[in-house]
Amino acid sequence: MASFKRYKTNSGYRWSVQVSIGKDPMTGRYRYTTRRGFKRKQDAEDAAREILNQVDEGEFIKNEYVTFEEVYEKWIEEQGRRLKISTMMSKKSKFTKYILPNFGKLFIDQITTKDCQDFIDKLATHMKSFRDYGNQLDLVFRYAKRKKLLRENPMDELVYPPYVDEYSSPEEDQGVEFWERETVNYFLERAEQEFSFRVFAMFRTLLYTGIRKGELAALLETDLCEEKKELHINKNLVRVDNQHLLLRPKTKNSIRTITLDDETFEILVKLKKLNERLREEHGNPDIEKFLFPRPSDLKPMRLAHPNERLNYACKKFKVKNIKVHGLRHTHASMLFASGARMKDIQQRLGHARISTTMDIYTHITEDTDGNLSKLLASYLNKETAPNREDNEV
């Protein structure tokens, strides 16, 4: 639909045309575009027909000066209607930390492939997951194109740099890191002597169960079965807008029961008694009973707490900092060394695929391959030596 208007200028009369181009995909309101300066009405009519043809064919783009951040807000709102909270938090974190500071205030139709290429190239110099940031960026541009805010997606021509180890700094965590048995015993001995019982119990639980820190933070006292000496893992703690939520794990394999050794079990039973005393001191015996609450207010622990305590402990004890996830790998390494079956280890760790468990095993055993050859040679030499002597006699 088009409307025409004749108006007077210093140079004489001119024609303008206003054309309806449909609803704004961002606001839902009808949009219009105006062209002015035509000497003849016929010229204005021709221009209107061209615009309407472009609209019909989905090729008309009206520069509304929409910023990348405005498009992102609409896109993330759409994503929130179909994705889990934990997935949404992960997406938002990527945009808040890196993508929005770089693109947020730019008009989306003015962002070029070079802008995107420079961004990805820079990320690739200091992080392994740079491709995932590119994928998220691409999704927003695809959304904008679908909403007729772009003609072309600038990510279509982007070339990802290859991932090689030189992109990671020497200090960055490489592969699977874990402690040997001697380090585990030394670390726990020092932790028991020099930290609070709660911190020691946290480290002991992480090392002797292999659970994730989100699973640890979500543990309720009712998850400790005292009759069977078992720990039930069936939820994960996440934080949204400074509020904690207990969510079901992403995969059914993460819902599992872990049998505890006697010492770890006794430590957790003692922790329950300390928690009961703590609730009485706070005068709030009916508060949600987390197994590892914050002593200050009995709320669930901050997810950063295990990282902070481990960083401090490793520096104090002068042991390699393998990060909290490395404690999970350490648990796996101890299970491998004990001769546990791969399938049983997969179930205990809550891996959805046994290939994940086997990948950890491969990394852990890589350093021992050379020793295996030496052991084999030594064994064969011991067996054959008496035979050579017998032949000589």
Image: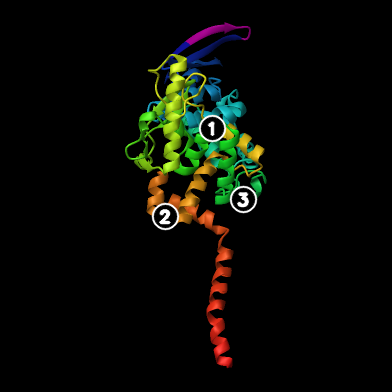
Which residue in the structure is indicated by mark 2?
340
Q: 139 or 150, which is in the foreground?
A: 139
Please tell me whether mark 2 sits on a helix, a strand or a loop. Answer: loop
Report, in whole angstroms, how far the alpha carbon at label 3 lies from the one at label 2.
Answer: 34 Å
Please tell me whether mark 1 sits on a helix, a strand or a loop. Answer: helix
Q: Residue 37, percent across and down? A: 57, 15
Name the side, left or right, on which 166 lies relative to 275: right
Name the side, left or right, on which 53 lies relative to 105: left
Q: Name the residue: 52% across, 39% down.
A: 132
Name the side, left or right, on which 244 lies relative to 174: left
Which three-letter amino acid code belongs to the residue tagged 2? Ala
Task: Name the residue furthest left.
Answer: 227
Which residue in the structure is indicated by mark 3?
164
Residue 291 seen anywhere in this rendered image of the structure? no
Bounds of the magenta segment: 5-11
Q: Earlier in the sequence, mark 3 or mark 2?
A: 3
Please tell me whether mark 3 sits on a helix, a strand or a loop. Answer: loop
Report, in whole angstroms, how far the alpha carbon at label 1 lies from the one at label 2.
Answer: 28 Å
Q: Earlier in the sequence, mark 3 or mark 1?
A: 3
Q: Main secondary structure of the magenta part?
A: strand
Q: Residue 61, percent across and down? A: 50, 26
Which three-letter amino acid code belongs to the residue tagged 3? Val
Q: Within 10 angstroms of label 3, few (less than 14), some, or many (20 or more) residues?
A: few
Which residue in the structure is indicated by mark 1?
199
